[in-house]
Structure formats: C-alpha cells, structure tokens
Amino acid sequence: MKINAIVAGATGLVGSFLLKRLLEDKSFASVTVFARRPAGLRHPSLTEHIADFSEPSAWRHKVMGDVLFLCLGTTRAKAGGKRAQYRVDHDYQLELASAAADNGVRAVVLVSSAGAKQGSPFFYMRMKAEVERDIQSLYPENLSIIRPGPLTGPRREKRYAEMAGVSVISTLNRLGLLRRYRPVHADTVARAMVNAALKGDTGVKVYELSEVFDLAARERKSD
C-alpha cells in the first residue's frame, strides 16, 4: 500500500531535499506540504498549503495522511530570540503533531539534533529534547527521531557563524575528535527520514548520528 506523506518545513535545508525524495519515490502516493512560503515545485502528487503556524485553527483539519515528517526549524538570530525560536522549533511542531494525532495520522518522523538532552545547559539541545519528549507523548507507538550533527548543504541564506562551526568540527573530526557531532549533508538526513518511514518500526526509535548515516545508506527493494 502506498503512503500519503505530510511534510512540515519543506522549504528548509532538510525539508527541500526531503520533498524531492518523497516526490520521486514510488512508495508514496501523495505529498502534502505545510510551509510558510511556496516550495517552488510542481508535481501531480504534491498539494501545498501556505500556513501561518501561529493560527492552527486555519490548518489543523488539513493535516491528513499516513506519515508526518517534521523538519521545521529556525535560528535564534533569525527568529529574534530564544522564545521566538522555541515557538517555531517546539510549539509549532507540537501543534502539527497534535493535529496529526487527532486526524488519525499513524506515524511521525522528526528531525532533532545530536546531543539533544533534557536538562542540558545548552538551550538548543534542551529545546530539541523537549520537542522529542512532547511529541513522544502523542506518538508513543510510532515515532522515529533523527539526530543529525551540524548540517551542510546549499542554504538560501548565509549562516557565517554556523559555517565556521562546521569547519572547526570537520577539522577536529579529522583528528579523531568530536565524531559524535560530525557534519552531515541535508540530503543524507532526508534519505534517512524516508527510510525510517518505510521501515515501519513500532514504538519510539531514536537514530543517533552514526545510525543516521547507516539508515540513509540502507538499500531496499524498489517497486
């Protein structure tokens, strides 16, 4: 049976690669996108909703399908502070997962982060862990959590501090250090997300960084 996918964050770095892979994969019958701006793609299987995520009453009833892919995210600088970033990365994604649960969507695949930990002294890691925890409360039986390291790939905007951080980590990786946080291309994360959905595991499955690479490389029979 083919799958009807829902994607939140399809115009972001991971989401843009994910959307293309879903539209190319014969395992998926349709892809419904919820985004803040048009994805810029046309496809007979694609339905696009331009959503104001702060107004859930306008879109909750449209979150319909089989699997919800969550890859919404922003930076503190772009959002305008920690609270605004938390609203995007946590609150909006939780509202989407809640709508999906209410509408009978059976599974969620969530992009989190390597190092996500409740009680972490680092705001970002703590926020990601809280997203995981709260969505798990809605999907204790069908949740896949992808924890990539720093993301690489073509972005719409230049993030110079992030680029510098990736460069430093890459150098340390070559010295055998901080392998847990080694950079990963956004398309690798997208492939891992697709394969996680198609595996159909039950319960809560957390894919740490090394497992993300393995999952992305997983071969499967084509239709």
Image (tube, rainbow, N blue to C red):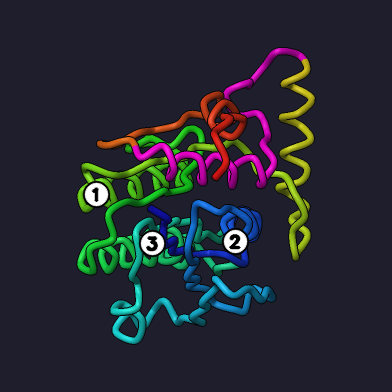
Query: Residue furthest toward the bottom?
Result: 58
Q: Is label 1 in a helix, a strand or a loop?
A: loop
Q: Earlier in the sequence, mark 1 or mark 2?
A: 2
Where does the image place residue 29, in percent across and percent down from the top left?
A: 47, 62
> Mark 1, mark 2: which one is toward the viewer?
2
- Kindly state the secondary structure of the residue where label 2 is placed: helix
Is label 1 in contact with label 3 (beta carbons under 8 Å)? no
Q: CA distance from mark 1 to mark 3?
A: 13 Å
Q: Nearer the viewer, mark 1 or mark 3?
A: 1
Query: What is the secondary structure assignment of the residue under circle 3?
Result: helix
The disc, 3 or 2, on the residue closer to the chain's N-terminal end is: 2
Residue flagged by tag 2: what amino acid is it? Leu
For disc 1, the neighbor class at 10 Å (few under 14, some 14 to 19, many from 20) is many
Question: What residue lies at 43% left-to-right and 37% top-to-bottom?
Answer: 116
Residue tagged by mark 1?
139
Circle nearer the N terminus (1, 3):
3
Q: Quadrant of residue 221?
A: top right
**Residue type highlighted by circle 3:** Gln
State the residue position of label 2: 23
Quarter that holds the C terminus: top right
Q: In the image, is 165 to the left or to the right of 112?
A: right
Across and down, in percent, residue 197 comes to 43, 45
Residue 32, percent from left and from top: 47, 70
- Residue 18 in the magenta stretch? The answer is no
Q: Which residue is mark 3?
A: 93
* Disc 3 + disc 2, Cβ < 8 Å: no
Magenta segment's dominant SS is: helix
Q: Which residues are magenta?
A: 175-200
> Is 130 displayed left or right of 34 in the figure?
left
